[in-house]
Amino acid sequence: MIMALYGVMTLDEMLKTENYGDDEGRRSGEHAAQGPPVVAVSGVKNSGKTTLLAGIIPVLKKLGLKVAVIKHDGHDFTPDVPGTDSFRLRASGAAGVAVYSASRCMIIKEKADVRVEDIADQFYDMDLILLEGGKFSGYRKVEVVRGAVSRSFVSDPATLLALCTDEDLHVEGVPVFSLNDYEGIAGRIVKFIREEDGHARRIWQGN
């Protein structure tokens, strides 16, 4: 059950009353110009951010939303598999490599000071971008607080959309969900992008 939108509403009822991710909406000039809203899923290391994302994405997809995820890596990483042609081309000195087929593409680019906005530009046709990380960013966020790892939130309370926790935490005006209440958390995100989408997009544009 999703309890965050119109009192109590099941997923099936929501699907009948709203079409959040219709193709016509994605193609609109306003959507393309402003870009999709960005919501961060934050928390300290090993708090369960990826687990939460893997749980809420299927719910959001069932609601018709086309969702992209941007993941922050605090360390450097190898973006390709050794032995592939694209890996060899990067190793030869190419500053950027793209691989594409009829159904997907991958772009690898060497760039200093990468910003979330630089990557978000590539997802202009999405309905929602979820950022894994960004706990100190200005993006509105769901923070995961798992008692085995931490006992309190670390984000600015003014940026919190929700807390996802197994601890007894309370912040005025911020709903609290259990760690595996994927439908409730997805409902909170949908409620936010319906009611405050302009705010989310202004942050995305850096204003």
Image (cartoon, rainbow, N blue to C red):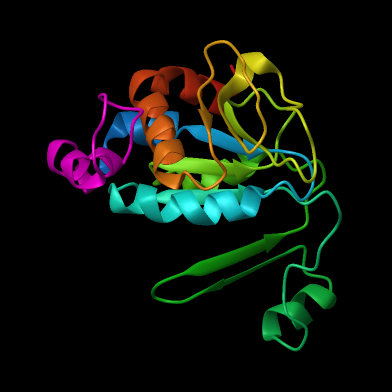
Which quadrant would the C terminus be assigned to in this image?
A: top right
Give the image location of residue 72, x and y in percent. Answer: 72, 48
Spot occupied by residue 178 in the image (x, y as percentages of width and height): 54, 39
Residue at the location (42% across, 40% down)?
Answer: 186
Left or right of residue 194: residue 136: right
Q: Nearer the viewer, residue 23 or 38?
A: 38
Question: What residue appears at the point 83 percent right and 48 percent down from the top-left corner?
Answer: 74
Q: Residue at x 30, y 53 (%)?
A: 62
Q: Position of residue 80 (x, y in %)?
A: 72, 74
Side of 106 relative to 32 (left or right): right
Q: Residue furthest front?
A: 168
Q: Residue furthest right?
A: 75
Query: Which residue reaches farthest bottom?
Result: 83
Magenta residues span 1-26
- Among the 4 quarters of the image, the one containing residue 184: top left
Q: Say which of 107 and 152 sits in front.
A: 152
Is 124 left or right of 160, judged from the image as shown?
A: left
Q: Is residue 91 above or below residue 57?
A: below
Quarter holding residue 30: top left
Does 34 appear above or below 88?
above
Residue drawn at x 75%, y 79% as measured from the top left:
87
Q: Is residue 17 magenta?
A: yes
In the picture, residue 165 is in which quadrant? top right
Q: Position of residue 36 (x, y in %)?
A: 44, 36
